[in-house]
Amino acid sequence: MSSILQAKPGHIAATPGQQFHTRDREVLRHTYSNMCAAFCSLKNGRMVHSEGLLEFDAFHWLEASPDVVEYREQCQQIYYPNGSRMRRYTPDIVATLTSGVSVCIEVKPFAKTLETDTKHRLACLAEFYRRHHQPFVVLTDKFIRQQPCLAQLRWLFQNASYVQPGQQEARMALGKLARYLPCSIATANIHLTGQRINAEYLMLAGYLHALDASEPLSYETLIAYGTSEMQSRLGQLDISQTLFWTEQEGREDA
């Protein structure tokens, strides 16, 4: 029996029941410069709302990351010192990791983080969270929009089964494919007829990968067992260890 059949169930499976969530701050209205969007989240069991397309893209990484159990938008509002004044702040996202740690995430274009006012504000926030022993991360487009990983994630989420499979169901699906791999995504889905899980779901869960990770995904893409480059990139999203992402990126570019 292939060792892949002993793998853990897919990490994008939804948490039991629907997540009840109340935002501390309402999502801003859609404007010409602010494209609001809603992401259908398996992990959270509900629609997650973003204030811009960069946040929307960040949801793809959080949804597929094996280290993230669930995430919420626009919650855990705080007041932090900024000079002689107290300022109000609501994180874009609060993610709960498998370790039980919650991480506050600010999503910001990298060019914006280089502006003097924004750098000062983020530094004040990082210091506030440091004093309160709360992990704080600034995710920028330099990580979120890595290609071809983001394009592959988008394609998979558009086509993956929207189900909550158990471990036994995942093993059954993988068992059906064992004698046919490597094969195309379309061929794999033919052999999974009657199953609630399709090949795209198994790729998101890390069980299957594209043989050519440099090419856009399509139904003709050849797949096999194992971890993809995309899953390796997800491992880089170690938000439990990164307290101030922007500062690190700034040093790398210096």
Image (cartoon, rainbow, N blue to C red):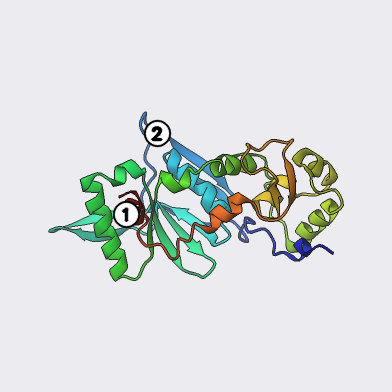
2 to the left or right of 98: right
The amino acid type found where label 2 is placed reads: His
- Along the viewing direction, whichever of 242 and 88 lies nearer the viewer: 242
> Could you tell me which residue is drawn at 35 percent across and 32 percent down?
33
In the rendered image, residue 216, in percent from the top left (x then y), is placed at 63, 36
Residue occupied by mark 1: 251
In the rendered image, residue 124, in percent from the top left (x then y), is placed at 24, 59
Instruction: Relative to 226, say whether 32 is above or below.
Output: above
Q: In this view, which residue lies farthest toward the right?
A: 179
Identify the element where label 1 is drawn.
helix
183 to the left or right of 123: right
The amino acid type found where label 1 is placed reads: Arg
> Could you tell me which residue is drawn at 82 percent across and 57 percent down?
172
In the rendered image, residue 39, in percent from the top left (x then y), is placed at 53, 43
Instruction: Relative to 175, say whether 111 is above or below.
Output: above
Image quadrant where one finds the N terminus: bottom right
The part of the image, by quadrant, that contains residue 165 is bottom right
243 to the left or right of 19: left
Q: Is residue 136 visible?
A: yes
> Could you tell me which residue is drawn at 44 percent across and 54 percent down?
22
In the rendered image, residue 144, in percent from the top left (x then y), is placed at 47, 46
Q: Nearer the viewer, mark 2 or mark 1?
A: 1
Identify the element where label 2 is drawn.
loop
79 to the left or right of 228: left
* Disc number placed over residue 241 in the picture, else none: none
- Along the viewing direction, whichever of 147 and 115 lies nearer the viewer: 147
Residue occupied by mark 2: 30
